[in-house]
Amino acid sequence: MTELLNVQGLSVRFSGLTALDDVSFTLEEGAVRAVIGPNGAGKSTLFNAISGYVTPTSGSVHLKGRELTKLTPHEIAEQGVRRTFQNGGLFPALTVLENVLTGLHAQTEGSFLDILLGRSKALKSEAGNIHRARELLKLMSMDHMADTRAGDLSGGQQRIVEIVRTVASDPPVLLLDEPAVGLSPVARAQMMEIIHRLAGEKGVGILLIEHAVELVMAAADRILVMAAGARIAEGTPEEIREDRAVLEAYLGHS
Amino acid sequence: MLMQLTLGGFAQGAIYALIALSLTVVYRSTTVVNFGHGDFVMAGAFLSYVLVVLAGIAFLPAAALAMIAMFVLGVLFSKGLIRPIRGGPHIGLALMCISAGYVLRGIARMVWGREVLPMPAVFDMEPIFLGDLVITGDAVFIIGTVLVLLILFFGVLALTDLGKMVQAVYQSPRGARLIGLNVERFNDFSWGIGAALGALGGILVAPVSLLHPDLGASFLIKGFAAMTLGGFGSLGGAVLGGILLGLAEQYAGAYLDSALIEITAYVVIVLVLFIRPQGLFGRKAVVKV
Amino acid sequence: MPSARQRQLRTLLFWAVPALLLLLPLATNAYTQFIVNGMLISVLVTLGFTLVIGNLGQLAFANTAFFGIGAYASAILSAKLGLPWIVTIPLAGVLGALGGFLASSAALRGIRSYYLAIITLAFGELMRWAYLHSKPLTGGTDGLPLPREAMFGISLSDDTLKFYIFLAVTVLLVKATLNLMRSRFGRAVMAVRENEIATASLAIPTARVILVSFIWSGFVVGCAGALFARHVGHVFPESFGMLHLIASFAMVLVGGLGSVLGAVLGAVLLTALPEYLRAFPGMEELFFGLIVAAVLVAMPMGLASLLRRLSPIFVERYYREES
Amino acid sequence: MNKLTSLMAVAAFAAAPALAQDAEWETQGLTDDAITIGVMGPFSGNASSYSKALIGMMAYYDKVNEEGGVHGRKLVAVQEDTACDSAKGLAAAKKLISQDEVFMLQGNSCSGVALALRPTIEEAGLPWIVAHAVSDSISTPLAGNIFHGVPTGSANGRAMAAFVLSKPDTENVAIIEHSNDWAHSYSNPARDYLKEQGVEPTAELTMERGQTDATAQVLKLRQNKPDFIIAALYEAETAIFLRDLKKYGMGDIPVMGTAGTDLENTLKRTGDFDTVKNYYVIHSYVDNLDGEKMKPWGDMIHKYYPDEELSTFSFVSIGSAEALVSALEAVGPDLTRSKLIAALEEVRDFDTGILSDPITWTPEDHQGVKGSAVAGFVDGEPTVLKAWGQPY
């Protein structure tokens, strides 16, 4: 399998506090890697450091050999590492379709001037994107909601739309920040299905933060366990289930 | 000349400090910046005029009555117009404040639009000459009143139970709600205090100035500049910022060019926000992007 | 969503309105024509304003500054450099855009919300001070008269001629702004307002979106300033003070925050209304104050939201599906 | 006028004044028993205190009407608000001209608005008597239909400077002013006059509207020790400036103010005679405001506007109204706009009984009032003066 993401010795320190301590791992095409750990373990910091919202103190992130470490969030997204947000990153006042279209921003052709003048180049590209967005929504059986305000959707629907928006541009790497939180069992199953399909059919490399253990165990090929900013264990779900350090980390905090 | 300018700067700065403080009181508890505050200041001045000149009440009781009236107006404004749109975008709140100010100004204009009103001098004391320095009754009166008020204000805040409660709310409104404090009512109260303090600014200016409905506009900007300079949200900073702005105006006017007095406040705002957005004492005034 | 037929109807409506307006001078006298011309200017000012405070969600009050910059640019370029006025319109727009760039530089330094409001207010007043104290260029307090000029053999003091020029500029800029809003750019602008952090995660350069919004707003309002310079024929510093801000606010709000249709409606209505209030001088402040307060409480999304409920053809979507 | 024809004949539109001089146009706004007069003024906005200036004129119309009008016609004022804003003022003028179709215009207070109006009104061609705004550029260069019925800025400014220099041994003159068109319309001609007389102002200071403190300015003046100060400040700021001047021990320096202020109200505002005893103002009238010769005029205003608080503004437009009525009388019953303009240009040395200087309008010069008296306190009484120490 081709390596997509290569994280080497990533550390983040805020005024003396170490939020992320020398974390390294790789993510391959079609792989699902979960990151688990108690609250404050540094999972979100890891995501923020990879996606450019937090500047790492040391270490590096490469996508297919290209360095991402010094790039801004939108540049990293443009390179093909896209993420969702724990608290939901949808734009509530925009419709579902508009939300998905924002995910295709960088894929739309036409300069500012083309847009201003309504030139056909910009219009054609826009029409193509609208078509694509509708197709994607149809795949998720969300096409009937295309003109609903995103803020009016249920929590589960919002999560799905956010994922549709995030994968609309076919990014090679996807960072999912607690995609199943607050979802009903049915919606969880649907989310699992989506994750499987993305990884299995499209070969997307997925990095997943999740608290729902059964989802993690079922979805992930490998699991990275963190505590206090550092990696304490890594392995397949089976290995992790047996790992003493993991048990201690969890028991010690609960 | 330096001493004289300093005294004049303190007298002007005391008024700015009062206005900045009253803006800050509202801002700290409600996170709303009252863009109509200048007109609250004007309304205070006009009310005291009505009570002194038209109703024949002595200045001090009239001032107290005007402040009480403005307190009530502030509370009503908070209850009636701010509460319904709380939690909405800042734009709505800013516009609501501006429109309230316009209503006050419109009323003043309807009644007094065509007259510029004089207020009888309050502290008609013979100026004291200390060598080159002239100390006037007005300056003593303004600085004295503001000083007493500040001591009272910060005293209450630091020493009484009420003050400690207020500080607790400033720290964490959610925590305050948890311990059973009625935050809504506390916000109404803050609006009242803000309006009353601002009105006092107007009342103090009234005898040394003349009254017209546009009186407030320049004070609003001065208040903003003082707040920005002292650090947004810092009560002590607002006071200090006001004094410094008063001094800066006087020095700039005398040593550089008198045309600069008018824009000192604007220049202060632009420079502070660009160079040191947190002001002298404030928390950082910028939103993280 | 509007059906294909409704979309056609909407396009038809969009062009029918200005087409019908071409006949308007038959029904007006010099006074009513002057008021209508003023409405067109207000439409542009409101449009530029609503883009920044409504769509982008930034509390920037630099609108009067852009307007003044545009008006003075037009007056100076025609009076001092002898350029034909019509040529100064886009140039005034460019200078207004420069003002927009300055305002955005504050927003991009993280000066947002109330701080942005205060610093942009200060910016506007500093500009006014600059007009007052740059006498050789701006005429200082005496203002700057625009030179007499004719186009097609008709004097530019003629309100009918001005109407056709103003109408053309307004339709062009409204159409361009609509194109903008119904493109990826328009969506990005809204996205920044809704959630700036999430926007960046979608490969949208948020800083550039903010910058370009301000620049376009400055351009539109700057062009409006050039129209205003010719509308009045004489530019004074007092025309660009804080007092004019409330009228702009009221127009944005009554029409509907962030709506192009709303900008047009609000500007037309609230330019006309004070003329009906002429019989009650001095009531304007009270009136605008009460209107804004009432709209904020009772109808926060303005008239555009009422129309939207009336018919889906008034629903503004941030994408464009050509039929 | 048929709108369609004018629209198609666009070229004719450009030549509107020429086209407009037809018979119908000549008597627009005129009936057998009424002459409609458009009265523009700042009835709202932050300069609305100047709308007082139009009261005297309208009271005079009422008086004339009560006495039977002019050749049987009543003078009907149609008021329009300019809010002292150029766009609003233009709308007001266009409304009066093309919607209300008034016969003529009289009034307007704000110079900026008047300057913005000038091209429109000049093109429209109907007579306009400027009854308060002072800027010279309103009536110079000559516009055939625009007449200035008050002393202009240059007349006032020169009168101010001349009075200042008429005080023996005046060498050191300082100027303090607002940075607005109103203040400059006084101070610039005063500067010019001083320069002609070889006097260079030693200090030029600004004090903005709304400032409540003049310490910095006064301290600068204290270092400067001027013999005379020219103050082009509004009422409120004048009072503050004088008060601070006295506060800092400079109450003995004479101060020359504009026609925008008067002694009586300045005294009322400062509440202290010592503060204003060395204050002089441009005073375009024959007597002090509560003097014997002004009393009938004050009574006239109060007859029709009982609640009016009298100030120097209240009287300013009466003189031009008198001149208008005399010209209307001279034309006779067959009134037309052209005849009125011709009659106005015949007004020579017209003594209004209220303005200190007579009104003269000639075909070459429409600035009717060439000078102005000054008022100051003499022995504690407001007194009209011709020059330093010389009563009017």
Image: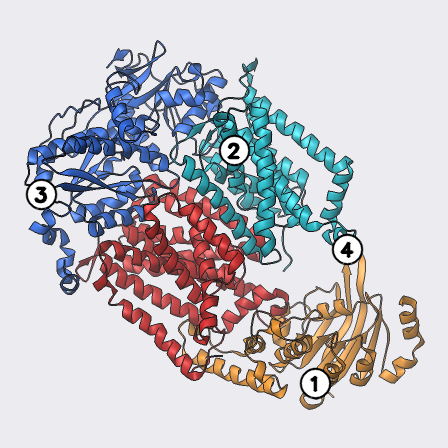
The answer to which image quadrant residue D274 occupies is: top left
Q: How crowded is mark 4: few (under 14 residues within 10 Å), some or many (20 or more)?
A: few
Residues under numbered marks 4 and 2 in contact, where contact means CB atoms less than 8 Å apart: no
Q: Which chain carries label 3?
A: D
User: What label does residue B47 carry, if any?
Assistant: 2
The amino acid pointed to by label 3 is Thr
Q: Name the residue under label 4.
A: A15
Residue tagged 1: A194
Q: Nearer the viewer, mark 1 or mark 3?
A: 3
- Kindly identify the amino acid type of the residue bearing the numbered disc 2: Leu
Q: How far apart are marks 4 and 2 (CA)?
A: 53 Å
Both labels 3 and 2 in a single chain: no
Where, by quadrant of the figure, is residue A216 drawn? bottom right
Q: Are marks 2 and 1 in contact (CB under 8 Å)?
A: no
- The colour applied to the residues of chain C in this rendering is red
Mark 1 on the same chain as mark 4: yes
Colour scheme in the image? Answer: by chain
Q: Residue at x 63, y 25 (%)?
A: B144
Q: How far apart are marks 1 and 3 (CA)?
A: 89 Å
Report whether mark 3 lies on the same chain as mark 4.
no
Q: Do labels 2 and 1 share a chain?
A: no
Chain A tint in image: orange
Q: Which quadrant would the N terminus of chain D be assigned to in this image?
A: bottom left
Q: Mark 2 lies on which chain?
A: B
| Image quadrant containing the C terminus of chain D | top left
Point out residue C213 in the picture as x, y percentages from the top left corner: 49, 63
Which residue type carries mark 1?
Ile
Name the residue nearer the viewer: C85 or A69. C85
Please give the letter of the chain rendered in blue: D
- Amino acid on which disc 4 is placed: Ser
Residue denoted by label 3: D336
Chain B on-screen colour: cyan
